[in-house]
Amino acid sequence: MSVLEAEAAPDEREGRSAVPRPGYGLAAAGFALPVALAIFWEWLVAAGIANGRLMPPPSVVGRTLWDLAASGELLAHAGATLWRVAAGFGLGALAGTVLGAVTGALPIARSLLDPTLQALRAIPSIAWVPLFILWLGIFEASKVALIAVGVFFPVYLGVAAAIQGIDRKIVEVGRVFRLSRLAMARRVLLPAILPSWITALRSGLGLGFMFVVAAEIMGASEGLGYLLVDGQQLGRPDTIIAAIISFAVLGKLADGLLVAITRPFLAWQDTARDKL
Amino acid sequence: MLSFDRLTKTYADGTRALSSITLDVGRGEIVALLGGSGCGKTTLLRLVAGLDRPSDGAIRLGGEAIAEPRADVGVIFQEPRLFPWLGVAENVGFGLSHLSAFEREGLVTNALARVGLAGHQKRWPRELSGGQQQRVAIARALVTRPKLLLMDEPFSALDATTRASLHDHLLALWQESRPTVVMVTHDVEEAVALADRILVMQPKPGRIFDELDNPLARPRDRLSPAFEAAKREALRALDRSLRHEAPHQEKAAETAGMWW
């Protein structure tokens, strides 16, 4: 029987990889609509049918982006934004992970901390801004703090829920092998929550980018958010759109980086990822 | 070797899962606990594994009371319960972390070959069929050479052919070190095929209803008349254990395999 199975297994794997992955053609299809709209708008403005002042055509936005990049401004602004997100995300994710782990694992900590944290979560994060500015000043610290608060809650909730949701059955196997508390955490609990933790980090990162905009709009001398405000005050919608596009690219890249870093740790997952 | 002394387990909600079970299991003996659902088979096994505490009475293994999982007791659960994030070899070697990588590899390779999974070391559990996963679980439990092996309906989710082949794998492994085995099953044929002694249990509260010795010599031929006779006897005892409680279910024996 095992011989039969050993023979059958490679075929099965070949069969799986031989199935054409749907998506390459379809992924390209996703570009069709925005590209068509861009060309259409470009044509409308070029033909004089539409006024491109409030909604500049793609060529103008592209030139503005190019100028910003060539002068080094774009890099400086993006660098400032990225630094804030990285610092805020680091702090928020660390705090969220630690507190989430503690409240998830210890019922006492859960009863003590969770109600307070849930109440704090109900506060819209932006509401902290005046207080943070009073406490931490108008420079970097208050911005990083706001981003950290934004990142903290999804990570905290994700980790706490993941720990509470660990399968009792798999923990029992650990008990049968008489793992110490530390070994149990390292060899069973940590790998078990890893997928949920990474998902939580990704949603935290997304919120980090959301809050960096808020922080920078409310007062900054550099950063992509500053570029947004600058474009508004100078009546330059092309600058605003250039900043928006930069945000989209940065956010997507940061998320892609997080996924790429964590992918090797999730190779074991039995998901439909390949087929989706 | 293993003894239960008036073992009782009452759950917090007042359910009497086990009531005053007294039993001795000899060294190297294979004992099957046979019974319908809710008669406390699994509860008994969990107590022996040290995963739960008895409410009253004691379990002794080699004279020592069992209060928590022990290194010389292996458990095979109803489901494979493999760690999905570990490859097959790492799953089998999970309980061998105190050994050097070299020793571990040797034992793991040997154990996998014994269950017919040689060459599958690097695969993920998700890539295996249900029967293959359960074989990995068997290898994982036996690679540590336990003195006592506990099995909780380990083959119940598998088809009949796979089950029979796994029985053979298991007996081959058992021959090597001859651990004491306590297995829970609701499959009469499985009990007759593997066990030296069959204990028929009865529910509400869980207790031992009857005890059958299985004199058949190994290897056992499932198609022999003697095997059939032993099976019929076990079935009859199981039937009686149920009729005690529900006298109208006389057909239960004929449709065994349907009612649970």
Image: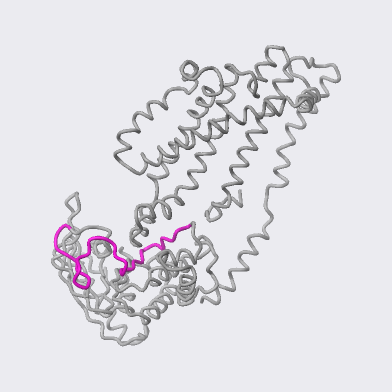
Q: Residue furthest right?
A: A47
Please give the name of the residue rendered at 51% of the width and 77% of the height, measured from the top-left corner. A1
Please report the residue visible at 73 percent of the width from the left and 42 percent of the height from the top: A28
Left/right placement of residue B17 relative to residue B97 reads left
* A26 sits left or right of A124 in the view: right
Q: Quadrant of the N terminus of chain B?
A: bottom left
Q: Quadrant of residue B35?
A: bottom left
Colour scheme shown: one colour
Q: Give the tally of numbered discs.
A: 0
What x and y, as percent, mark residue B129?
50, 65
The picture places residue A237, in percent across and down from the top left corner, at: 72, 17
Image: B31 above or below B18:
below
Viewer-closest of A172 and B39: A172
Residue B29 in percent (x, y) is at 27, 79
Along the viewing direction, whichever of B190 and A264 lies nearer the viewer = A264
Q: Which residues are magenta?
A: B55-84
Residue B191 x, y percent position in the rendering:
30, 75
User: Would you place residue B170 above or below residue A12 in this image?
Assistant: below
Residue drawn at 35 percent across, 62 percent down = A177
The C terminus of chain B - image quarter:
bottom left
Q: Quadrant of residue A205?
A: top right
Q: Quadrant of residue A73?
A: top right
Query: Is residue B154 on the magenta stretch?
Result: no
Main secondary structure type of the part rendered in magenta: loop
| Residue at point 68%, 12% (across, down) | A233
